[in-house]
Amino acid sequence: MLELKLEEGRRWLSDGNVQVPIVPFGECRGRYQGSVFVLASGPSAGEFPLARYADWPIIAMNGSIVRCVDEQITPFFYICDDPGFVRDRPDLARLGARSATHLAMSLNCFQELHRHDPTVLAQRANVLLLERVNRRHGMAVLSDRSYAWSIRKDPDLICGFSLLRKKTNRIGFSCDMSKGYFGARTIPFAATQLACHLGFSQVFIIGMDLNKSIGRFYETGAAALPSSLDEDFEDYILPSFRIVAEQVSSRYPLRLFNLSPDSRLPASVVPKVQPTQLDALLEAEMTVTGGKCLRGRS
């Protein structure tokens, strides 16, 4: 069984034979700048000309790794926090774990991946551990309301608070992944928090259609995994992205753009941009950076 170990102040994933060092999120905070693409799995991701933007960093997740592999693109990050996905589609999880420059998963995802193929993590570097806020390993778990109240003065954690509605206390945004991240019931939101943590200022989200009826671009028919998008949209997904629009962007130099023209998420929450607008935004950024696509800074 793969377990999380603490040795000499560092954390490791270990099963007694394999030992994989965990890179602390603090080591990569604010090290990057410019634009990043977040590649989700809605049908519009299958139509987006990804190869045209291969010079920019891409955060892939779950089954969206298929597009990167098809286009021979090495994603900057591959992330996954759903052990059910790893269990049901281990081929895709393994593909992401082997392909990306950086790998970030929750502990239960790492355990499922290791159970399926013990060689994957043994051959990897740049492994990071995704942990939910108020669920970090080795720390006491508070009630959602108590946790929301406890972080009210933390500039890195923006959270709703309510004495009346429990769900309000679960909605938030983390600008520091070492303190955990808010789930929002959709993995692109975790990727957005990761992008902010890394220091990127423009986030272009591909394939965030958020429409259960049209599924994912990489699966059809009986092979399609179940989705709870309809159940979660109003209570978690929409208010989570609304927090970014109303509170995060005013405190941090973070702008989100939705490249899915038919996304269920309103343009008033995350602006939708056309291909010509995307190119103009990237060109403007390159003018500022001296004509370079910046992945990192020393």
Image (spheres, rainbow, N blue to C red):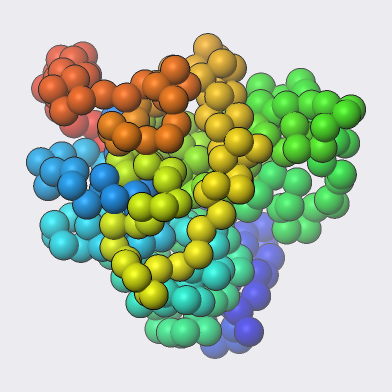
Q: Which image quarter: residue 155?
A: top right
**Quadrant hosting residue 117:** bottom left
Residue at left offset 65%, top offset 37%: 235
Drawn side of residue 165 relative to residue 31, left or right? right
Q: Is residue 290 left or right of residue 179?
A: left
Quadrant position of the C terminus in the picture? top left
Residue lying at the far bottom in this picture: please name it.
17
- Residue at 55 percent of width and 70 percent of height: 84
Give the camera-side residue of 182 and 176: 182
- The x, y position of residue 262, in whole percent, is 32, 34
Point 70% across, 28% down: residue: 159
Residue 217 position by quadrant: bottom left
Is residue 162 or residue 65 the one in the foreground?
Answer: 162
From the viewer's side, name the closer residue of 35 and 61.
61
Residue 270 appears in the picture as rendered: yes
Count the marks. Answer: 0
**Residue 170 image position (x, y, % from top left):** 72, 38
Give the x, y percent position of residue 93: 40, 69
Identify the residue shown where x is 73% and y is 52%. 135
Q: Is residue 115 above or below residue 271?
A: below
Q: For residue 181, say whether it is visible.
A: no
Quadrant of image for the N terminus: bottom right
Q: In the rendered view, would you say 197 is above or below 230?
A: above
* Percent coordinates x, y for residue 242 in the rendering: 55, 24
The relative height of residue 36 versus residue 256 in the rendered view (above or below) is below
